Image: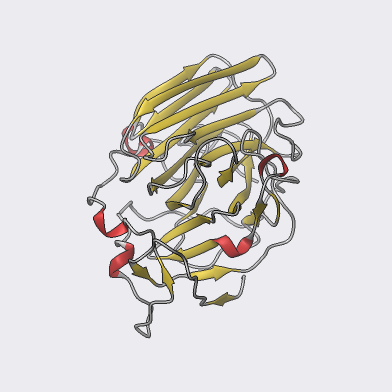
Amino acid sequence: MISRSHVRLAVLSMVAMLAVSTLGAAQGEVGSGTASAQGEAASGTAEAAACPSSSAPADPADETDSTGSTDVTAPADSTDLTASTGGASAAEVHSWGTPAWCAEFDDQLDPADWVIYDSAGHDGQGRRSPDQLFIGNGSLYLYGRADGTTAGLGSRHSQVYGRWETRVRMYEGADSYHPIALLWPDGGGGGVHSATGEEIDFLGVMDRPGRWRANFYLETPQGEEQSYSEADMTTWHTYAVENSPGGVVGYLDGREWFRSSRSTRSPMSACLQLDWFPGHGGPGEAWMEVDWLRVYPLDPGGTGGGTG
């Protein structure tokens, strides 16, 4: 397991306190397309685990570590967020069954499950650093600094067809930062577009400092498709995607909001990224908080291909 140590960040405009742990660097890097990272995700070997039922993490302002210390500052508006269940889960609404693999972010990240980016940022802009990832309150936090130093990571668990779902909330921040949850092909490389011409962004936020519009993006060798839905993304929501031979379906809080007859055909891994696009919006800082990520086979019986 990655070693765990407490750090202090002196971050302007952040006043609510929480205890978190920094995550040490893992070996290797993961590719991502429109939200590009460098390198490739390898298949993991960890066994699948049943995930607990969903519940909202504590507000960052309410949490301290076991010694009562408050080691790092949270987003300034974290105490102002309205409690939210984040809507329904697509897995529950559509009876997807037991996850083949899941991450609840209750403890350190295991390098058998994750590749943590330590590389140049999107399109060579800024830097992705393991120091910008934090775990606390049962959540994973990705933090982007005003100078473009930010965070990203990719799962080592891939499947050709299947279902993926994550529960995320944003904080109002610089619109030069784009929070993204996406699927990227194994062996896809580190370019803006993958080597296979495939990518699925089942959550994307572009040029919206108030975080009120969610974007869905699909790229296949047949072309690109996009959709969006307005939502208050500073409260919890679930974002999911189903990729099958018959096409791709996107879900927001269990409700369909994207559908295409096209689908990707390569083994795909889930990536979580806070990407910096200097010149696309105002400068500043940004946070992205992830409650959990879950990976399902294409059918509840587990015959949809499984994870690596």
Q: Is residue 17 above or below residue 145?
A: below
Please provide percent x and percent y for residue 60: 33, 64
Is any atom of residue 194 visible in this view?
Answer: yes
**Left or right of residue 117, residue 285 in this image:** left
Q: Residue at x 62, y 62 (%)?
A: 130
Q: Quadrant of residue 15?
A: bottom left
Please provide percent x and percent y for residue 262: 58, 16
How are the residues colored?
A: secondary structure
Quadrant holding the N terminus: bottom right
* Number of numbered discs: 0
Please provide percent x and percent y for residue 211: 38, 39
Is any atom of residue 272 visible in this view?
Answer: no
Query: Quick one: 229 or 247, which is closer to the camera?
Result: 229
Please provide percent x and percent y for residue 17: 35, 70
Q: Is residue 32 above or below residue 74?
A: above
Query: Quick one: 6 or 277, which is closer to the camera?
Result: 277
- Which residue is most to the bottom? 67
Q: Residue at x 31, y 38 (%)?
A: 232
Q: Is residue 149 above or below residue 94?
A: below
Q: Residue at x 30, y 55 (%)?
A: 56
**Left or right of residue 22, residue 72 in this image:** left
